Image (cartoon, rainbow, N blue to C red):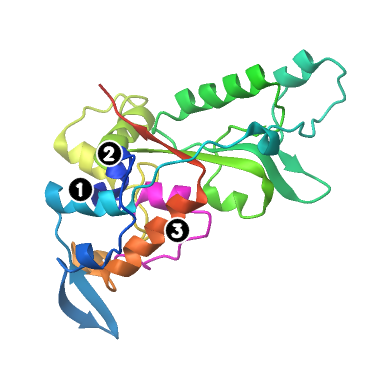
Amino acid sequence: DTQELWPIFAGLGSSTTATRSSTASSASSSEKIISVNGTDYFRVCLPDPCMDQVASQLARPFSTQSKDGWCIEGQTKTQQQSSDNVLSLSRNAFNDNTHQWQGLLLVKVPKAASSTCAGVVLRIARQQQCTALQWQHKEGFHFQNRSQQHHFLVGSIRQPAQRAFSSVWFFQLAPLNITPTDENVIRALNTRRAGKTVGKGGYQYNYLSIERVIRKSLWDAEQGDLIMNHPSRLYQRIQQLINTYHFIIVIERM
């Protein structure tokens, strides 16, 4: 399940003027292999040219958003008159009156430059004097209930294999001084801490998704590299996720 919906996500930033054409043409390269208990399983084209085509159809330019809507003064746990003191407090962008999230909301994906992204949004909030800011680790489904007119949703994505290896090293191998042999790395990759999900389309898709992803709804380990249902349905779900965000940061390690 570390395929993370393949390199589709990683290529979303490759085109800033992508054509919003139907995914039917990209899905035409798929091939139905088997049906199991009423569910069809397909094999899709995975080489880079195929993924570049899919990414070019799913990618979207992100429009400029006026800060007037999302740069608002959020609730803080203590009353401070000084704006400097307010900005130094832990940000709280949850409105207790409306029970909605508001302001600048970062879905902070672990090991996808999460600390760097948090630093960016903290700096933006400080410079623009915005106090409604969420910058800590919270999965996307926490933000289902958002003030539609008063929020700006940001996320980040990284090449799936690179993110997974980074997570394995940072959280498991290095802290425990484990030698990074093939066996140890593979064992670590097959843990939830490293990012393994149970048929949810991969760690980053599941983490960024605003709706809860059902187990084994996209992939079944028993069927190897085959995906469940026609690829066009999968691409539609990815498109819906992308359209939910106001900006997605594509991470590239040099």
Sequence order check: which comes first, mark 2 or mark 3? 2
Asked if residue 159 can be seen in this view, the reply is no
Question: Circles 1 and 2: CB distance less than 8 Å?
Answer: yes
Looking at the picture, does residue 61 appear above or below residue 27?
above
SS assignment for the magenta stretch, majority: loop
Q: Which residue is mark 1?
A: 52
Q: Between residues 99 and 77, which one lies in front from this camera angle?
A: 99
Q: Which residue is painted at 69% across and 29% down in the image?
A: 91
**Region of the chain picked out in magenta, as a range:** 202-219
Residue 205: in magenta span: yes
- Viewer-nearest residue: 117 or 38: 117
Q: Which mark is residue 240?
A: 3
Instruction: Pick the residue in front: 4 or 81.
Output: 81
- Give the percent coordinates (x, y) of residue 241: 45, 54
Of the image marks 1 and 2, the number of the one nearer the N terminus: 2
Dot 1 or dot 3: first in sequence order is 1
Where residue 14 is drawn, which disc sits there?
A: 2
Q: Quadrant of residue 14?
A: top left
Residue at x-position 27% and y-position 72%? 230
Pointer 3 local density, CA inside 10 Å: few below 14, some 14–19, many at least 20: few
At label 3, which amino acid type do we have?
A: Gln
Side of 208 where 52 appears, left or right: left
- Which residue: 13% across, 49% down? 49
- Marks 2/3: CA–CA distance: 18 Å
Residue 247 appears anywhere in the view: yes
Q: Amino acid at mark 2?
A: Ser
